[in-house]
Image (spheres, rainbow, N blue to C red):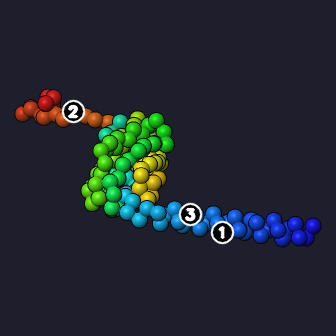
Amino acid sequence: MRSMKKILSLLVTVFFVLNTSNYAIAQDARPNAPEITFESAVYDYGTISKNANGEGTFHFTNTGKEPLILTDVRSSCGCTVPEWPNAPIMPGQKGSLKVKYDTNRIGQINKSVTVLSNAKNSSVVLRLKGNIVEGANETVPTKKLGDGSPIAK
């Protein structure tokens, strides 16, 4: 019984070591692979009014040595719509990923966008944050006449 535990323990250890070394080899197998580097992984809307423009942009650069291809971009909900370049991004070239958040809900914004690509860092999670508040009541500017009575512009 004791020897069975030792054998099982040894097998688990060997499996772990082999699995870890395979991972290291796989990472070294693509030294020239593209790499996506974002200027910022967070887009902060700050405090905006309900139904305001919910467009934002994430800027990135291919810092690898081969063309970068964005294969998919997924948002954490249907309230965020991403738009990304379909053409390969060459080494050193910049690109942008646009998002449009539906600002018709009042409250905190805390959403994510996952970028999938052929890069070394093949999955990158970006974040949208901010706060949507009820918009201020809009008033029509008025101009007073000489007698003090207002007229609408």
Up the image or down, 18 lies above or below 56; here it is below
Q: Which mark is residue 23?
A: 3
User: Cβ–Cβ below 8 Å for labels 1 and 2?
Assistant: no
- Percent x, y of residue 46: 37, 51
The reply, left or right, for residue 41 in relation to residue 12 is left
Please determine whether, in this image, residue 55 is positioned above or below residue 8.
above
Number of other residues with Cα within 10 Å of mark 3, as a class: few under 14, some 14 to 19, many 20 or more:
few
- Residue 73: percent from left, percent from top: 42, 44
Nearer the observer, 98 or 1 = 1
Q: Which mark is residue 140?
A: 2
Q: Report the front residue among 32 and 109.
A: 32
* Between marks 1 and 2 in the image, the one whose residue lies nearer the viewer: 1
Tell me the quarter of the picture where residue 42 sits: bottom left
- Residue 31 placed where, x, y %? 41, 65
Q: Nearer the viewer, residue 3 or 101?
A: 3
Give the Cα separation between the discs numbered 1 and 2.
Answer: 72 Å
Q: Amino acid at mark 1?
A: Val
Residue underneath mark 1: 17
Q: Give the amino acid type for the residue marked by disc 2 in the picture.
A: Val
Distance, label 3 to label 2, CA atoms, is 65 Å
Q: Residue at x 71, y 68 (%)?
A: 14
Q: Quadrant of residue 139?
A: top left
Residue under the image location 27 percent in, 60 percent down: 92
Q: Is residue 26 visible?
A: yes
The amino acid at mark 3 is Tyr
Asked if the residue at tag 1 contacts the one at tag 3, i.e. Cβ–Cβ closer than 8 Å, the answer is no
* Pointer 1 or 2: first along the chain: 1
Is 145 on the left or on the right of 54, as rendered? Answer: left
